[in-house]
């Protein structure tokens, strides 16, 4: 597995981005243009607001957070990705497969308790946030990550044709 590449930016590049962002009304276009995206949640925003504020009496509350988002036309959005599309005739295909499977079991004399379906599901040690703060008019919400989300383990889920669930099994890489 290739190592995640860490990108660092020099001061001139950072200043160019800030200058470009100040020149436009909505800097989400600038962020897309430079491919600079990190997931920012409400807690992170509130902590940074408190950190940047010089007023010791400033209190970050849920009300402040909601009003700040409304004032800056920002909403909490889910990242957009290319999703898998299910076939239009999925239900028909499922019924046809069940009929085929039941006929094959009867023809060969297999009991349903001896026929299994197993699925391997990847799970990640570090799940990147799928929600971030984004401007209301943005159509896509890409999120950059550090690459640690690639470290995973596998969980197998198994069910018998008669409906009995077997206990899940966990598989760790290299173990």
Image (cartoon, helix red, strand yellow):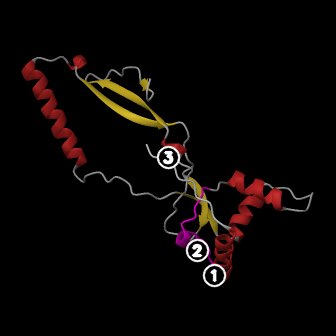
Residue in the image at 57% along x and 54% along y: 6
User: Any magenta on residue 37?
Assistant: yes
Residue in the image at 21% along x and 20% along y: 112
Q: Quadrant of residue 169?
A: top left
Disc 3 designates what residue? 3
Give the foreground label among 3 and 1: 3
Magenta span: 24-39
Q: Which of 100 and 36 is in front in this view?
A: 36
> Which quadrant of the figure contains the C terminus?
top left
Disc 2 designates what residue? 30
Q: Could you tell me if residue 62 is visible in this image?
A: no
Whether the residues at callouts 1 and 2 have beta carbons within 8 Å, the answer is yes
Q: Compared with residue 60, is residue 93 higher up or lower down, i.e. above or below?
A: above
Give the foreground label among 3 and 2: 3
Dot 1: what SS? Answer: loop
Dot label at residue 135: none
């Amino acid at each position: 597995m290739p190592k995640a590449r860490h990108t660092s930016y020099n001061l001139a590049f950072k200043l160019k981005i800030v200058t470009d962002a100040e020149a436009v009304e909505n800097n989400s276009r600038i962020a897309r243009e430079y491919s600079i995206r990190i997931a920012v949640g409400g807690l992170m925003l509130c902590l940074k607001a408190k950190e940047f504020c010089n007023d010791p009496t400033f209190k970050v509350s849920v009300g402040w957070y909601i009003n700040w988002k409304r004032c800056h036309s920002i909403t909490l959005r889910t990242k957009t990705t290319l999703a898998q599309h299910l076939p239009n005739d999925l239900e028909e295909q499922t019924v046809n497969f069940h009929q085929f499977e039941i006929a094959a079991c009867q023809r060969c004399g297999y009991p349903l308790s001896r026929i299994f379906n197993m699925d391997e599901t990847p799970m990640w040690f570090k799940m990147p946030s799928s929600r971030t703060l984004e401007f209301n008019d943005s159509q896509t919400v890409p999120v950059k990550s550090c690459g640690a989300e690639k470290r995973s383990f596998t969980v197998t889920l198994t069910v018998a044709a008669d409906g009995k669930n077997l206990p899940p099994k966990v598989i760790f890489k290299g173990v």
